[in-house]
Image (spheres, coloured by chain):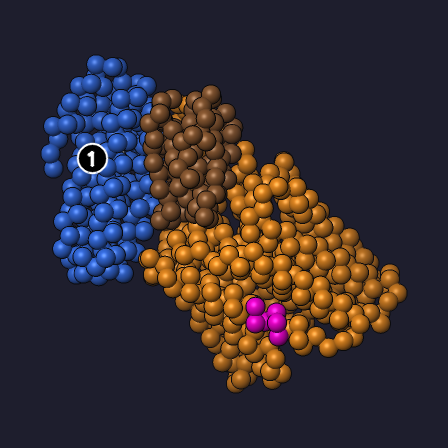
Amino acid sequence: MKKILLDAREMEHPIPLQLSLSYLQSMSSGEFLYMIHRKNPIPLIEIAKEKKYSYLVKNHNDIWHILISKESDINLEDLVDV
Amino acid sequence: MIITNYMRSEHRACDELFADAEKSVIDGDFTKAEEQFLKFSNETLRHFKKEEDELFVVFESITGNSEGPTRVMRFEHEQVRGVIGKMAEAIESRDKDAYLSLAESMMILLQQHNMKEEQMLYAMCDRVIPQDKKEETLKNMDKIEL
Amino acid sequence: MFNQGGLSLEQAPPISVVLRFFITGGIFGVILSLFMLFNIDNSLIIVHLLGLGVMASFMLGAMFQMLPVIAGVVIKTPTKKALVVHILLSLGILLQISAFSTSSNPYLYLSSSIILGGGLLYASILMFKRLIEIKDHSSSSKGMLFAISSFIITIILGVVMLLTIGGYLDMPYLLLKLRDIHYSFAIFGWVTLLIIAISFQVIEMFFVTPKYPTIMTKYLILSLFSLLVIKSILIFSSIDTILIDITLSSLLIIYAGVTLHRLYRRRRPTADGSVWFWRFGMILLIISLSTFFIDNLRDITYISFIGFALSIIFAMVYKIVPFLVWFHLSNQGYMEAPMMHDIIHPKRVKIHFFIHLTLFIILIINSFLNFTTLNIVSNIFLTISFSWILYHIVIATRKYYYIQRSFTPIKW
Ligand SMILES: [Fe+2]
Ligand SMILES: [Fe+2]
């Protein structure tokens, strides 16, 4: 699995949403999006749900780690850094 | 998706150059920032040129439409060029606050523009341009210099 | 791949839901300033035009938009529900104003309590029910729950008072106590708690600031709400509330100070007009609460509190409207979607900020001087201020529908 890292902690709204959507759109099935953010990006998760992508949201020390993949049988728990 | 992938990776590369320059400005290292900003603006302007002189032209000739999406994109390029000019002035006069303000508008502006291209225009290019023509366009774009 | 014509964002309500409330808020703002300009000095009318017509309209619009985004709460058929609330609210306010201005027509009191109370209770109970179902609360969504609870209490007390004044309920001896509790929950509950809840989310999100201290995001809103409940009980038992008021004010002053400090430590210090609105709002909140206990500065307390609430509302509107217009249009697949700064230009926001700043400086100065001319000047500024924001929301709305009408979205 190839990791596409998006560290959005320093980015201003709505740039994280813009970038993550465009990454998500172009991502192939061998890749997964690894987003790091200050806030839980609910709209992004809703879209992932709607598209039936696998996703994982983890809050560690007040930093959100969001993993999204188009693969349905994938264990994202193994890929999260925290 | 070869057009989308090629162009998208250029967008990302420009984003990174932009972030480098901003970091140097925040650290107060204007000599370094100047160099990095120049790289960013050169790459961005070259990317625009690739679009305007190659990709958009091919798209327009195939769809027979030069008044539609590409016209909007060209117009947005002009807006970005305007902000690049102002940022260059700010960096020259070592004005940190002005630079960072402009950087904020630039980032939001550029991301809006890029998202439109990636979501709509490039996707359309990948769909309507025949494969061999796509490869040719990519080759021609590689050759473009500022 | 994403489906035709961009993303179908089920959880984001259609833009009309938000814009209808924002436009209404702006219109009531202009009506309010005209009332002031023509010296219609009925404080009940002014307070309710401001609190309901302006503030509740903007805040309900913002809630419809933000509940899905911040709290993950989905309101089904939002267009229909927003329309019902919108009609009842607008009609209800007009009835209420007529009731207050004729003062002796019981039917006006009855009808406004039913229509206004009904519309507001419908909206707030709907939001309350969705919010209480959430399993993973963030500090913002929990705060919104308390803000909405305060709103419900405010509305119920308001309805009871309208019916009492109209002669349908017989408890005039309670009226003064009810009024104090009603205003406490409206001002410190609904308005202030909602702003705090929103700030916990958007200050970091919009402006990339350091985080609020955890102790504050965890306990502040809960403490304020508990204090309000205790305060109401004391009011009811005719016990002095000074200790509660001091605690309440101190907590809010600390909150405002912390928020100012977040904004001060922003990486891009001067960029954004809405940052200035937030900063000025927090300064006014501090002024308002530190004059709270000085009897002959009462006017300043009220004026600066109103300024605080309006500052934050304007800051939010100028952030939300351009973003929504751009976001909806580009997701629908319109290449022609205007850039956010072409929808409402940041310079226009800055100009409004200076109008707003001047207005409140004049108001505060004139609370000492009491000059008639300054009074007229401030009322003119107030009119300009509300007209300014109304004009820009309307222009943004027109741009949105113009693009939709004139161009074809790209399907891919
Ligand atoms: Fe472009
Ligand atoms: Fe591009």
Identified at 78% across, 53% down, the residue is C114
- The residue at label 1 has a CB less than 8 Å from ligand 2: yes
Q: Which chain is orange?
A: C
| Rendered position, C112 above or below B116 | below
Where B43 falls versus C158 (above or below)? above
Residue C280: % across, % down: 45, 67
Q: Position of residue B96 (x, y in %)?
A: 24, 60
Along the viewing direction, whichever of B57 and A1 lies nearer the viewer: A1
The residue drawn where x is 11% and y is 28% is B143
Q: Is residue B35 at least partly visible in the picture?
A: yes
- What hue does chain A carry in this figure? brown
Quarter holding residue C262: bottom left
Chain ID of residue with mark 1: B
Circle 1 packing at 10 Å, graded few (<14), some (14-19), many (20+), is many
Quadrant of the frame with the N terminus of chain C: top left
Where residue A7 sits, quadrant-wise, is top left
The secondary structure that most of the magenta stretch takes on is: helix
Relative side of C68 to C245, left or right: left
In the image, the chain rendered in blue is B
Specify the quadrant of the image occupied by residue A4.
top left
Q: Indicate left or right for C296 with A20 as reference.
A: right
Q: Position of residue C357 (x, y in %)?
A: 44, 69
Residue C398 in sight: no
C247 in the magenta segment:
yes
Residue C333 lies, in percent from the top left, at 41, 31
Picture residue at 47% right of the left edge, 75% below the top: C361
Could you say which is closer to the camera, residue A75 or residue C300? A75
Residue in view at x 68 percent, y 65 percent: C228
Q: Amino acid type of disc 1? A: His
Residue C13 position (above or below residue C313): above
Residue pointed to by mark 1? B47
What's drawn in magenta, residue-wise? Answer: C246-251
